[in-house]
Image (cartoon, rainbow, N blue to C red):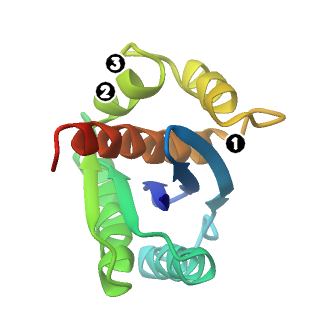
Amino acid sequence: MAELVLGIDPGSRATGYGLVMRNGQRLSAVAHGVIRPKAKAPLADRLETIFSGLVEQIERHGPVAAAVEEVFFSANARSALTLGQARGVALLAAAVKGLPVFEYTPSVVKNAVVGYGRAEKRQVQHMVRLILGLPGAPAQDAADALAVAICHCNSMDFQDRAGR
């Protein structure tokens, strides 16, 4: 049975999204991109742009689940707080549309896609392109979102084998 998963890489300046179709063991990209709010816009306006953009993708494609990357810890508390707010908006967009939400740490995502939890972003982009058979590397934020969706699809596969 085919299942469509929305992967989200939240950020207040750029939020990546990626939709991955899982059909048995086969994974394929359905859509991916980056939501880029106006850089000089107030935070509330940027968050609304992210929310609206994600809701639009959910309504357009109809995924069955959302997978969101967890916030990494930063030395800059203000940046971490702003990132957390963008992440909260992503969680809200999925919840408002009735999607179950799954969360994965960056190291779990990288391990699922590259095989190494401390992989560099270029390595993630490259492996996402290979796994999904894309003609070129997606934008960095979109590649990260696709990687989160791939991670969830792999997790679904494990859960299926475990009989859950």
Q: Determine whether 130 is above or below 27 in the image.
A: above
Callouts 3 and 1 close, C-beta under 8 Å:
no
Q: In the visual, does 126 lie left or right of 113? A: right
Q: Which residue is mark 3?
A: 117
Q: Residue at x 66, y 23 (%)?
A: 126
Q: Which residue is mark 1?
A: 139
Q: Residue at x 27, y 36 (%)?
A: 158
Residue 93 image point, x, y percent: 39, 78
Q: Which residue is mark 2?
A: 107
Choose the circle earlier in sequence order: 2 or 1.
Answer: 2
Q: CA distance from mark 3 to mark 1?
A: 20 Å
Q: CA distance from mark 2 to mark 1?
A: 19 Å
For residue 14, say whether it is visible: no
Callouts 2 and 1 close, C-beta under 8 Å:
no
Amino acid on which disc 2 is placed:
Ser
Residue 1 image point, x, y percent: 47, 59
Choose the circle earlier in sequence order: 3 or 1.
Answer: 3
Q: CA distance from mark 3 to mark 2?
A: 4 Å
In this rendered view, identify the residue nearer to me: 132 or 50: 132
Instruction: Categorize mark 2 by other alpha carbons within 10 Å: few (<14), some (14-19), many (20+).
Output: some
Kind of element beneath mark 1:
loop
For residue 38, say whether it is visible: yes
